[in-house]
């Protein structure tokens, strides 16, 4: 079930502002043998610097990995650029449990693209699970119980995990009534890419039944030099059998950071698409990071932004947004 919120889904991507750094990331997932089969993930990303006179690529990264199945999520192959010896760190380990702790050790300050690659790898645990999003929507049309077979959307929904899964939520009520909580197929997306090469890194189409996680963050000197402005876009979407992209979650976040202290002076989230109206109750949680430094906010979000007044997707996006220290340093270098 996904609904357009008041702001609605994005329909375009603005050009980068002068004196800014833009980071774009996409993570694609596919299960070519079906919902219980092997998982293929691939990621691409780019850091783009824009001055008053020119735009240049200051970092790029990509990876491809395969996961045996969703029984244990074991990674059985992985390759990346830049090569950060990922095989030594991640091969035969879980793509979900403990992966983020392992990739945090990989950043190499002597290689500009390493922080970009680490930011991409941080999305693997969630992307691995969401790679079945299209197939979950198709199976949502199957009755909850048929003999011994159970619809996978009926499993694993503990009360209070997020704003959409509280005791009196609409999705929970649907499930309790014996129906699927996924009442709609997601909001059809309008292309947010264009012929403007500065908007996003080069993208390949997502194949039918595939999944994509989109991230964009702009780090802007904001004219006065004393404040850093952040503008972030996040989307989880899948492509249906007919080749139509459908949006499951979409947020934009804007934030202001004191350039000297790196303290967050403002942080606001806006929902574009969410699974249900109940999910909108999580939007104010972004403001709880105001007054913290970006480094403290990253850990506070992971520790505190959980439960009935939050959204796991929004929290995850706030964590990624607060990992912008390397982009701020790049901004210092181009001014």
Image: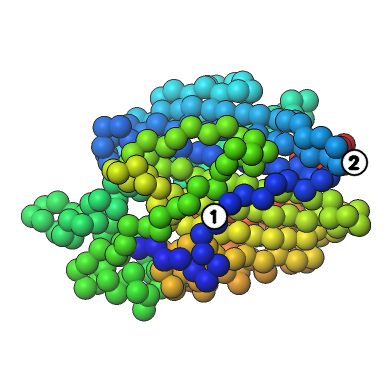
SS at mark 1 in the image: loop
Give the x, y percent position of residue 148. Answer: 11, 52
SS at mark 2 in the image: loop
Front-most of residues 211 and 156:
211
Residue 96 shows up from this direction: no
Mark 1 closeness class: few <14, some 14–19, many ≥20 residues within 10 Å:
few
Task: Answer above or below: position of 23 versus 283.
Answer: above
Give the x, y percent position of residue 136. Answer: 29, 50
Q: Residue furthest front?
A: 195
Residue 11 - label? 1
Q: Quadrant of the N terminus?
A: bottom left
Q: Residue furthest left?
A: 147
At x 71%, y 43%, the residue is 22
Tally of marks: 2
| Nearest-to-viewer mark from 1 and 2 | 1
Residue 285 shows up from this direction: yes
Give the x, y percent position of residue 87. Answer: 52, 22
Task: Answer above or below: position of 77 versus 124.
Answer: above
Task: Answer above or below: position of 39 versus 88.
Answer: below
Q: In terms of sequence position, does the residue under pointer 1 or pointer 2 come before the other?
A: 1
At x 64%, y 60%, the residue is 253
Mark 2 closeness class: few <14, some 14–19, many ≥20 residues within 10 Å:
few
At x 33%, y 35%, the residue is 31
At x 41%, y 42%, the residue is 211
Give the x, y percent position of residue 79. Answer: 52, 22
CA gap between label 1 and label 2 equals 31 Å
Q: Which residue is mark 2?
A: 335
Q: Quadrant of the C terminus?
A: top right
The image quarter in which residue 264 lies = bottom right
The image quarter in which residue 115 lies = top right
């Amino acid at each position: 079930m996904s609904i357009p919120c008041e702001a609605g889904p994005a329909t375009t991507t603005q050009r980068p502002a002068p004196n800014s750094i833009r980071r774009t990331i996409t993570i694609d997932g596919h299960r070519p043998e079906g919902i219980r089969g092997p998982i293929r993930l691939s990621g691409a990303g780019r850091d783009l610097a824009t001055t008053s006179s020119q735009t240049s690529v200051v970092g790029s990264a990509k990876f491809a990995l395969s996961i045996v199945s969703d029984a244990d999520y074991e990674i059985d192959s992985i390759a990346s650029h830049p090569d950060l010896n990922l095989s030594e760190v991640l091969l035969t380990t879980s793509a979900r449990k403990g992966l983020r702790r392992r990739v945090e050790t990989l950043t190499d300050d002597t290689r500009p693209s390493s922080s970009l690659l680490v930011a991409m790898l941080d999305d693997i645990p969630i992307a691995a699970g969401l790679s079945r999003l299209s197939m979950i929507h198709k199976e949502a049309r199957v009755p909850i119980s048929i003999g011994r077979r159970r619809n996978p959307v009926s499993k694993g929904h503990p009360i209070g995990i997020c704003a959409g899964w509280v005791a009196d939520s609409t999705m929970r009520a649907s499930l309790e009534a014996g129906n699927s909580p996924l009442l709609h197929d997601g909001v059809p997306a309008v292309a947010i890419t264009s012929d403007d090469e500065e908007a996003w890194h080069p993208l390949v189409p997502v194949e039918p039944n595939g999944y994509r996680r989109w991230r964009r963050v702009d780090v802007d000197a904001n004219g006065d030099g004393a404040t850093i402005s952040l503008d972030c876009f996040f989307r989880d979407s899948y492509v249906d059998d007919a080749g139509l992209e459908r949006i499951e979650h979409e947020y934009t976040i804007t934030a202001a950071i004191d350039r000297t202290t790196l303290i967050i002076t403002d942080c606001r989230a806006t929902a574009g698409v969410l699974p249900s109206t109940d999910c909108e109750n999580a939007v104010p949680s972004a403001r709880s990071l105001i007054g913290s430094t970006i480094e403290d906010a990253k850990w506070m979000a992971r520790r505190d932004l959980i439960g009935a007044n939050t959204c796991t997707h929004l929290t995850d996006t706030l964590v990624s947004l607060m990992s912008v220290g390397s982009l701020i340093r790049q901004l210092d270098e181009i001014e």
